[in-house]
Image (spheres, grey):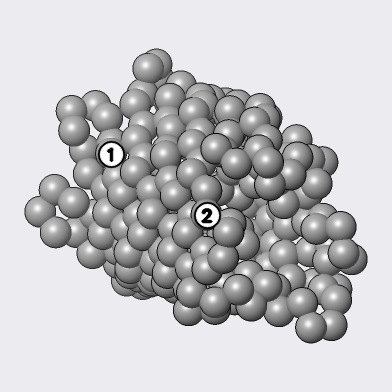
């Protein structure tokens, strides 16, 4: 699936797409940004989406009147069945309630050149929130799909996450989540890494990913991913 698909620049992406995205723009109700990047593996919720190989991605985001957002994102994937690309379309709102910023949204995951009958495309709904605790940011998120990847039926994913700046350009961040799918493929995943902002445009992320179900296959094994992302 693979929204936010995680894996890259968790810390840098959250700042670039979250913080900047919802600043008020006095000149226009719309604010666009573009991103492009690469990583040594595309990992989504602890699972490699590129058969443990590199990925290249790009996206566009817009904010709407300082509270809404919409965007699109594309990446190569490799599921070993001919599917070779993913595109995500998403939209939502980020209202602020006291010290908490909420994120209520929907994501459509589409896949290119998928085999007939594979039913890989699906929709996911998101409810998330985050807030500052001293210099740190902590958050939680819940995702729901009524017909998950591969036509497997209902699925949920919930996560707790946090980030902490340790230097002017360095942020440590991590998350623990659980993917629940109809059938035998439930698993828990976690990641921990550091993001480095080279400048206002380019950021790097070095991150360790793992799951508690290595028996599901090599793509569920632990791995370290290095990524770079530019936002402009």
Q: Quadrant of the N terminus?
A: bottom right
Q: CA distance from mark 2 to mark 1?
A: 25 Å
Of pointers 2 and 1, the one earlier in the residue sequence: 1
The x and y percentages for residue 159 are 38, 48
Give residue 106's quadrant in the image: bottom left
Q: Residue furthest top?
A: 167
Name the residue rendered at 67%, 30% in the picture: 223
Q: Residues within 10 Å of mark 1 (few under 14, many from 20)?
A: some
Between label 2 and label 1, give the one nearer the viewer: 2
Residue 148 image point, x, y percent: 57, 72
**What residue sits right under mark 2 in the picture?**
186
- Counting from the top left corner in percent of width and height, residue 203 is at 58, 33
Query: Is residue 76 visible from the viewing direction of this image?
Result: no
Q: Horizontal and vertical percent for residue 196? A: 53, 25
Q: Residue furthest bottom?
A: 117
User: What's the mark number on residue 91?
Assistant: none
Please give the name of the residue rendered at 47% of the width and 59% of the height, measured from the top-left corner: 180
Asked where in the image residue 67 lies, by quadrant, the reply is bottom left
Identify the residue under disc 1: 138
- Return the residue found at the far front: 184
Judging from the image, what secondary structure is the residue with disc 2 in? loop
Is residue 137 visible in the rendered image? The answer is: yes
Viewer-closest of 230 and 117: 117
Vertical placement of residue 154 versus 201, above or below = below
In the image: residue 44, left or right of residue 103: right
Vertical placement of residue 191 versus 172, above or below: below
């Amino acid at each position: 699936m693979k929204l936010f698909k995680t894996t890259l620049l968790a810390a840098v992406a959250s700042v670039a797409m979250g913080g900047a995205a919802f600043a008020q723009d006095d000149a226009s109700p719309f604010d666009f940004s573009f991103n492009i990047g690469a990583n040594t593996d595309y990992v989504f919720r602890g699972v490699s989406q590129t058969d443990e190989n590199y990925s290249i991605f790009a996206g566009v985001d817009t904010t709407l009147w300082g509270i809404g957002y919409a965007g699109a994102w594309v990446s190569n994937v490799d599921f070993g069945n001919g599917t070779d690309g993913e595109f995500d379309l998403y939209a939502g709102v980020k209202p602020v309630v006291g010290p908490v910023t909420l994120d209520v949204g929907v994501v459509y995951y589409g896949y290119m050149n998928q085999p007939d009958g594979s039913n890989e495309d699906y929709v996911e709904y998101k409810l998330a929130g985050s807030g500052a605790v001293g210099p740190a940011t902590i958050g939680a998120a819940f995702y729901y799909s009524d017909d998950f990847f591969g036509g497997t039926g209902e699925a949920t994913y919930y996560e707790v996450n946090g980030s902490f700046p340790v230097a002017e350009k360095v942020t440590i961040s991590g998350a623990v989540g659980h993917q629940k799918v109809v059938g035998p493929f439930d698993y828990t995943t976690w990641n921990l890494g550091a993001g480095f902002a080279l400048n206002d445009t380019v950021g790097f992320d070095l991150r360790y990913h793992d799951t508690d179900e290595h028996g599901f296959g090599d793509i569920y094994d632990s791995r370290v991913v290095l990524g770079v992302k530019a936002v402009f």
